[in-house]
Image: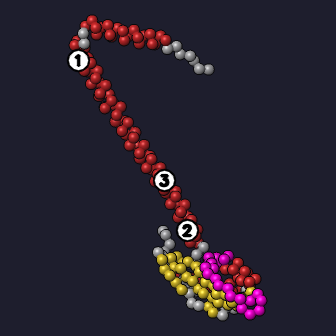
Amino acid sequence: MAAQIDIKPHVEALIREVSIVSATLKEKGSKRFGRTFALAGFMVFAAYFGVYNPPQKKSARLADEIKRAKMMSDYSTQYKDIRSSLEAAYTNLPAATEREQWLSNSVRDSLNAGNLVPEDFRPVREEEVSGLVFQTSTISMNLRFSEFFDWLLRLESAKPMMNLTNMEFVKKGAPGNNYATFDVSTVVPIKRFR
């Protein structure tokens, strides 16, 4: 239960003090209290600039430092999250040591798993950009759509990752037979971020 405070006696005491000071000033004159007013003004000035202001400046400086530290912490957290995402993506890509034959061997294995025989299997083309090697292999073959679908599932679920970037189908021969050309690609990171 909160206690009730009666401020009326305090207000009355303050009014009495002010009336005594004003009556004394009228009676004695303000020249007599000049040194006192100057000393009081100096004390107020010294208290503000010597006692109150320095901690306020220090407090503002510390608040700025805390704000900067929090911002750095937020940026650090964002950096770690992005780095973790990048490292997770890199784990799904072929290693640089397997760069030479990985794509050709993986595509050939996926074709063999479905008993598919390519008519044309062109060498891997490479393009290097910013520490990443983009590899593409072009394959042409005759196949049915159901064979293509099974092969696409194997290709897209392969680890490390490769995907079909381009395809062209042309009907050829008996109904359901197609002559298709595919571009299969992967990315090999040469430089990994440390």
Residue at image coords 70%, 78%: 153
Can residue 116 be seen here? The reply is no
Magenta run includes residue 101:
no
Q: Which mark is residue 128?
A: none
Residue 121, percent from left and from top: 62, 91
Question: Who comes first in sequence, dot 1 or dot 2?
Answer: 1
Mark 3: few/some/many CA within 10 Å (<14, 14-19, 20+) = few
Pointer 3 with pointer 1, Cβ within 8 A: no
Residue 117, percent from left and from top: 69, 91
Q: Amino acid at mark 3?
A: Ser
Mark 2: few/some/many CA within 10 Å (<14, 14-19, 20+) = some
Q: Amino acid at mark 2?
A: Glu
- SS at circle 1: helix
- Give how far apart the Cα atoms at labels 3 and 1 are: 55 Å
Per the image, the residue denoted by label 3 is 73
Residue 40, percent from left and from top: 29, 21
Q: Nearer the viewer, residue 20 or 83?
A: 20
Q: Which residues are magenta?
A: 156-177
Residue at image coords 56%, 16%: 4
Per the image, the residue denoted by label 1 is 35
Between label 1 and label 2, give the one nearer the viewer.
1
Q: Nearer the viewer, residue 149 or 110?
A: 149
Residue at image coords 59%, 20%: 2
Left/right placement of residue 80 relative to residue 179 reads: left
Quadrant of the snapshot with the N terminus: top right
Question: Who comes first in sequence, dot 3 or dot 1?
Answer: 1
- SS at circle 2: helix
Q: Nearer the viewer, residue 49 or 97?
A: 49
Q: Which mark is residue 87?
A: 2
Can residue 172 be seen here? The reply is yes
